[in-house]
Image (cartoon, helix red, strand yellow):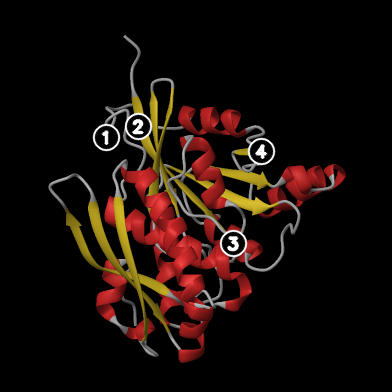
Amino acid sequence: MTQTKCGTVAVVGAPNAGKSTLVNAMVGQKVAIVSAKVQTTRQRLMGIAIDGPAQLLLIDTPGIFQPRRRLDRAMVKAAWDGAADGDVVALVVDAKTGLRGEVPDIIAALAKRPEPKFLVLNKVDICVKERLLVLAQAANALLAFDEIFFVSASTGDCVDRLKTALADRLPPGPWHYPEDQLSDATSRLMASELTREQLYQQLHAELPYAATIETEKWEERRDGSIVIHQQIVVERDSQKAIVLGKGGSRIKDIGATSRAAIAELTGKKIHLFLHVKVRPDWGDDRSLYSSVGLDFVD
């Protein structure tokens, strides 16, 4: 009988490196929201992937950046906590931007850690190929990575090879989750994340990332449908007007798209009601942090 393996893989990196897209690609289904907006991922979410006898617990962490306020500090703490929980650490680097911004500091911090470390150069499909080897050598000069992979999370190029290599590094042991479970996130949390994703995708640069979704009500009816009331929390009246749109058209579009996504996630009919609330100091509200899975930090 083949011995099973199970362990955690901490997927870390700077904002917008493609970590969530990579986790989704290895799982084979969407378990983390994605957008072109930096710092889309806020809390640690786990995707569960299978490779032969191995079950990989993929910890999708927020992007690591220089924090300026409480929400920033909470997100960065969640990222480093995720790295600390990993049997293997996969550092995802945007191959197009290279070793800029926070990346050298992240590599320096990882150099102090004992776990096997993989360098994953992502977005190779939009990168000049001649730069890849130079980039890999420059990164390896800062830290001797155990393995280096060139992947495109969006196209799936070399993702399966990476997943198998990560699986090979996991310790032997029983699987922690059923074979058909893809994430540790609750349906309630994923529903709020799907609405937040629509905020980013539909409003783009119009709305700062400092908006959040609070679930006020989740009721499962006898007919199998679910009634969900979500509150979109923003910081200013001008942001509320953007979310509502002319005559309420924008929030109607956000609600319709989010409702369809939640229905696909749950397999049930969804009745979704969205409300917008202005709360200038929501970033200092302890209860909101716990509702989205972040620690309230000083």
**Image check: 245 left or right of 138?**
left
Between circles 2 and 4, the one closer to the viewer is: 4
Residue holding disc 4: 155
> Pointer 2: residues within 10 angstroms few (<14), some, or many (20+)?
many
Residue holding disc 1: 176
Q: CA distance from mark 2 to mark 3?
A: 26 Å
Mark identifier at residue 14: 3
Placement of 81 over or under 148, stated as above or below: below
**Of all residues shown, which one is farthest toward the front?**
247
Mark identifier at residue 6: 2
Query: Percent position (x, y) of residue 39?
Result: 53, 66
Q: Amino acid at mark 4?
A: Thr
Disc 2 vs disc 1: Cβ atoms closer than 8 Å?
yes
Identify the element where label 1 is drawn. Answer: loop
Query: Percent position (x, y) of residue 274?
Result: 35, 70
Label located before the other in sequence (4 or 3): 3
Disc 3 vs disc 1: Cβ atoms closer than 8 Å?
no
Between circles 2 and 1, the one closer to the viewer is: 1
Identify the element where label 2 is drawn. Answer: strand
Query: Percent position (x, y) of residue 208?
Result: 54, 78
